[in-house]
Image: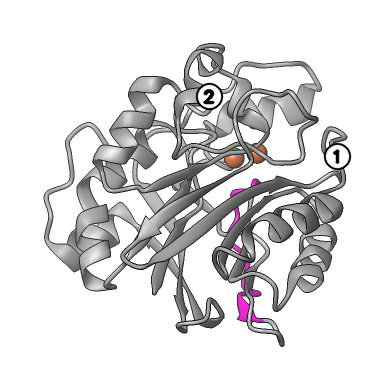
Amino acid sequence: MRILFIGDIVGRPGRYLLRDFLPAIKDEYNIDITIANGENAAHGNGLTKKIVDELYSYGIDILTSGNHIWDKKEVLDFIDQEERLIRPANYPDGVPGKGYTSYKLNDNVVFVVNIMGRVFMSPLDCPFKTIDKIIDECKDISNYIIIDFHGEATSEKIAFGYYVDGRVTAVLGTHTHVQTADYKILPGGTAYITDSGMTGPYDSVIGSDKSAIINKFITGMPSKFDVADGNAQLNAVIIETDNCGKAVSIATLNLTASNLEKKYGVDKDEEL
Ligand SMILES: [Fe+2]
Ligand SMILES: [Fe+2]
């Protein structure tokens, strides 16, 4: 099985890059399932129903999220009905939405789980205890378990990766929007990367317009952040598994829309 996991989609530049190039990428790498973190897809903040459907139409099978999932209030109107959209599983009981979902692929079931870190982030239930419970619920049905670990601290993500090594197919970090170079197969057969990166504006500060962020650092005053425009980038990882749910390889993709245009010869949309 070949899994494509796309790092946080930021705004229209990220969405339109996927619209223009995702079919060609899936075709080239023989992708069986495409998972993407969509927490910043609606102008950097959250998701609307329209954008969820738009992302599915581009070829994304499952959407994960993170701390920004609640930014658009309308998410509360549809999250409970969305089988293919998940939010971090370690929110307290009773919070809308679900922390993991399953996806049927030929004779296999693939579980996709979203977990959020607690270091330098809002306190939630323990990610380690939460994943133990979820693995217990899934393991009799399938060994294919893909985790999006949405966290800030590299140490917490790495510790989590080793904690579940051999029990899940992959632990793929999100949230920092910067792709890390530590992708590897852990000793027990779990694919791991601390952060998968961002699919959004290349010339930006983690997706936002540079000047507003620089101004905030200089003045210390709150400011409104807009999604940057210009050339977009794709950050993703591709995992290949054996027939038992263990990962056998992990590779990164890190390409700008200009690179993709040259590679696939697809016209870049004028709105990018
Ligand atoms: Fe994000
Ligand atoms: Fe986040």
The image shows residue 108, relative to residue 186, as above or below, that is above
Q: Secondary structure at mark 1?
A: loop
Q: Quadrant of ligand 1?
A: top right
CB contact under 8 Å: marks 1 and 2? no
Q: Which stretch appears magenta?
A: 175-185
User: In the displayed structure, does residue 272 sit left or right of residue 202?
Assistant: left
Q: Is label 1 or label 2 in front?
A: 2
Q: Where is mark 1, residue-wise?
A: 125
**Farthest front residue in view:** 140
Towards the viewer: 63 or 119: 63
Quarter of the picture containing the C terminus is top left
Q: x, y percentage for residue 145?
A: 58, 63
Please tell me whether residue 120 belongs to the stretch shown in magenta.
no
Cα gap from disc 1 to disc 2, whole angstroms: 20 Å
Picture residue at 39% right of the left edge, 74% below the top: 1
Q: Residue at x 46, y 25 (%)?
A: 81
Question: How far across and down, in percent of the image, does residue 226 sit?
Answer: 51, 23
Checking the image for residue 78, the label placed there is: none
Task: State left or right for residue 175 relative to residue 236.
Answer: right
Point 79% across, 47% down: residue = 117
Looking at the image, which residue is at 68% across and 63% down?
A: 194
Residue 183 is a magenta residue: yes
**Left or right of 54, for residue 92:** right
- Tell me the residue that label 2 is attached to: 80
Say which amino acid is labelled 2.
Answer: Asp
Q: What predominant SS class does the magenta segment belong to?
A: loop
Question: Which residue type does callout 1 highlight?
Answer: Asp
Q: Nearer the viewer, residue 196 or 187?
A: 187
